[in-house]
Image (cartoon, rainbow, N blue to C red):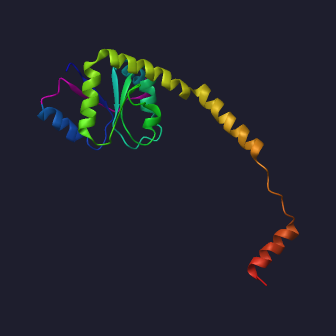
């Protein structure tokens, strides 16, 4: 397969991964980029054909959202919030966490089928639209408006009533 993996971040397995890349003689196919400053992410995402997020601790996965907004097909773990972003066989693949065969099959499919990869990238652009800041703000305003309209404040008891209740809890006779 014609590919080049660019891996961002510097996690606890960085050194082990670097050693494995050298051992398997993949230094011409895999680059470990380390920490990537925020301002360098958009051009990097623009270069990518596929974005892979194997992490299972993604609460919102801003990285995945940024990749989708750049038109990338996505391969992600079927965990936490990622299925909210990645729609199986619509804009990418969801893989069973830690299942190497799942990831290998998804990677092979997307790296060998340019038409599918392009279709998934276009779908990523559509799916991510609901996460635009304007839409998120509208959603929150709607939620808060509904909560305010439905909220019925509890009656505010008098000081005498509160003291009586407190005393009755201390001396239940």
Boundaries of the magenta span:
25-39
Tag count in the figure? 0
Which residue is found at the position 80% from the left and 73% from the top?
Answer: 165
* Residue 86 belongs to magenta span: no
Q: Quadrant of residue 44?
A: top left
Query: Which x, y percent locates residue 162?
Result: 82, 69
Query: Which residue is outermost to the front?
Result: 89
Q: Quadrant of residue 157?
A: bottom right
Which residue is found at the position 69% from the left and 34% from the top?
Answer: 142
Query: Which residue is outermost to the top?
Result: 115
Query: Which x, y percent locates residue 81?
Result: 46, 39
Q: Quadrant of residue 101?
A: top left
Query: Which x, y percent locates residue 168?
Result: 79, 78
| Quarter in which the C terminus is drawn | bottom right
Which residue is found at the position 23% from the left and 21% from the top?
Answer: 3
Q: Is residue 162 above or below residue 61?
A: below
Q: Nearer the viewer, residue 137 or 125?
A: 125
Q: Nearer the viewer, residue 114 or 11?
A: 114
| Quarter in which the N terminus is drawn | top left
Q: Is residue 160 left or right of residue 170?
A: right
Q: Is residue 6 left or right of residue 92?
A: left
Query: Which x, y percent locates residue 11?
Result: 31, 41
Which residue is found at the position 33% from the left and 15% from the top?
Answer: 115
Q: Is residue 41 left or right of residue 34?
A: right
Q: Nearer the viewer, residue 90 or 75?
A: 90
């Amino acid at each position: 397969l014609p590919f080049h993996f660019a891996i961002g971040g510097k996690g606890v397995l960085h050194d082990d991964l670097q050693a494995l890349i050298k051992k398997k003689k993949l230094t011409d196919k895999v680059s470990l980029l380390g920490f990537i400053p925020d301002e360098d992410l958009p051009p990097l995402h623009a270069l990518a054909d596929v974005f892979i997020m194997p992490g299972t601790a993604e609460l919102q996965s801003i990285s995945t959202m940024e990749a989708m907004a750049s038109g990338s097909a996505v391969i992600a773990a079927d965990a936490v919030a990622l299925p909210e972003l990645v729609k199986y066989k619509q804009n990418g693949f969801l893989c069973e966490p830690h299942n190497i065969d799942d990831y290998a099959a998804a990677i092979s499919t997307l790296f060998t089928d340019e038409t599918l990869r392009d279709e998934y990238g276009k779908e990523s652009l559509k799916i991510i639209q609901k996460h635009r800041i304007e839409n998120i703000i509208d959603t929150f305003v709607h939620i808060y408006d509904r909560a305010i309209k439905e909220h019925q404040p509890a009656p505010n008891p008098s000081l005498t009533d509160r003291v009586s209740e407190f005393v009755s809890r201390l001396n239940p006779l």
